[in-house]
Amino acid sequence: MKVDFRKWSLTDKKELMELCNAVDRTFLSDRLPNPYTDDDADWWLNMVAKSESVDGTFRAMLMDGKIIGSVSVERKADNRLEGELGYMLLKDYWNRGLMSQVVGQVCEIAIRELGLNRITANVFHSNVASQRVLLKNGFILKEIMYKAVIKGDNVYDILIYSLLSNVQ
């Protein structure tokens, strides 16, 4: 299967809301509002419009023209040469290698357009699928933050992966 990706547009509001309200949140940051409202979508799409190719690379993932996920690299405010990778995918599309296809391409775009030297990704210890996606795309496990996050009633370790650009 092949997945396509493209820049987000202000006209994607309805599909963004559907995605964010349907996505499995087991391994997602609590930064993502729940429920995801009109105001949330307006704020995020406007932020993306201002930040694209300046402080971030934001892509909608599509299958047969339908948005099924999102992947982004955002420049870290305190370290302007580093970006943080984040992604989400509707559960019906898990375990098909789709995220592995897109992550490497989006990271290459972010490194080139944003001038990044490093991209990091934080992954829940129990999220083995995301660990595989990162390893397939050249990320290396750099650190384990034990008992670093609480989600519901559970405390999780966070694995920090890193990808270095080819810049010397």
Image: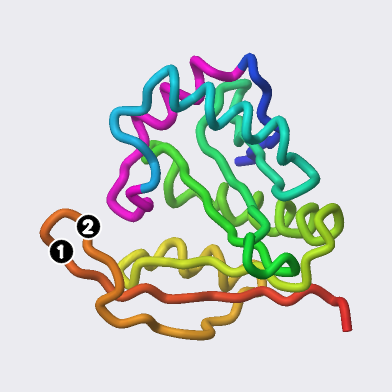
The residue at the point 87 percent across, 77 percent down is 167
Is 84 displayed left or right of 21 in the figure?
right
- The amino acid marked with disc number 2 is Lys
As drawn, 86 above or below 144: above
Magenta range: 12-30
Q: Residue furthest left?
A: 153
Across and down, in percent, residue 62 comes to: 61, 30
As drawn, 84 above or below 2: below
Front one among 61 and 25 = 25
- In the rendered image, the quadrant that contains the N terminus is top right
- The amino acid marked with disc number 1 is Asn
State the mark number for residue 154.
1
CA gap between label 2 and label 1 equals 5 Å
The residue at the point 72 percent across, 50 percent down is 55
Q: Residue furthest front?
A: 78
The residue at the point 64 percent across, 38 percent down is 3
Front one among 86 and 6 = 86
